[in-house]
Image (cartoon, rainbow, N blue to C red):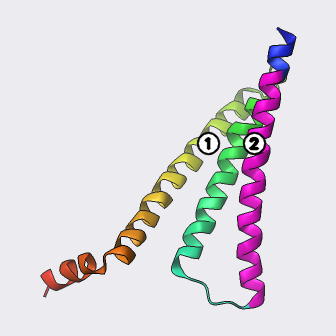
């Protein structure tokens, strides 16, 4: 039983660590682009919003789940649980909305005639 709990904790910790490292690498690439003075694309801000939403989701769900898998019980009080749940709900909503916005940009970029048809219909 103890070995299974430890194995689950290590798996959760590894997933959280990989997610944090991936988000941190995207954040470093964005900061490098800002510091070098490269022109930013409109999708760069969308990616940064997605990275921040993923950070919030990882910290609000991944860290408590990893701590619980390692056997820590009752490490959050009632207010802490409600706050973590609220942060996780906000992060998931922001992530979903950002992905939808990014899909809209991708559709317009792949098929610009859609944008022209909608724009032409208003004339």
Image quarter of the C terminus: bottom left
**Quadrant for the N terminus in the image:** top right
Q: Confirm whether the magenta stretch covers residue 31.
A: yes
Residue 34 visible to the viewer: yes
Q: Residue 66 location, x and y as percent?
A: 78, 31
Hey, which quadrant is residue 14 in on the image?
Answer: top right
Q: Residue at image x 73%, y 45%?
A: 59
SS of the residue under disc 2: helix
* Image position, residue 6 (x, y; %): 85, 21
Q: Is residue 36 left or right of residue 39?
A: right
Residues 97 and 47: in front is 47
**Residue 71 visible in the snapshot:** no
Number of residues whose C-alpha sits closer than 10 Å to that of mark 2, classed few (under 14), some (14–19) or many (20 or more): many
Q: Residue furthest front?
A: 110
Residue drawn at 62 percent across, 36 percent down: 85
* Residue labelled with disc 2: 16
Image coordinates for residue 113, horizontal then vertical, percent: 25, 80
Count residues near mark 1 (Cα–Cα under 10 Å), then give few for <14, some for 14-19, many for 20+: many
The residue positioned 71% from the left and 58% from the top of the image is 23
| Side of 57 where 122 appears, left or right | left
- Determine the CA span between mark 2 and mark 1: 14 Å
Q: Is residue 16 above or below residue 102?
A: above
- Could you say whether the residue bearing mark 1 is in a helix, strand or loop? helix
Question: Circle 1 is placed at which residue position?
Answer: 88
| 19 in the magenta segment | yes
**Residue 101 percent location from the top left of the image:** 43, 64
Q: Could you say which quadrant of the image residue 11 lies in? A: top right
> What's the magenta region?
7-36
């Amino acid at each position: 039983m103890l070995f299974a709990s430890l194995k689950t904790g290590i798996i959760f910790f590894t997933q959280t660590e990989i997610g944090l490292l991936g988000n941190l690498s995207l954040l470093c690439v964005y900061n490098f682009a800002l510091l070098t003075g490269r022109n930013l694309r409109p999708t760069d801000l969308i990616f940064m919003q997605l990275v921040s939403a993923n950070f919030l989701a990882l910290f609000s769900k991944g860290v408590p789940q990893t701590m619980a898998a390692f056997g820590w019980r009752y490490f959050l009080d009632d207010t802490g649980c409600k706050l973590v749940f609220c942060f996780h709900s906000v992060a998931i909503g922001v992530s979903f909305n950002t992905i939808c916005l990014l899909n809209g940009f991708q559709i317009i970029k792949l098929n610009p005639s859609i944008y022209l048809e909608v724009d032409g219909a208003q004339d």
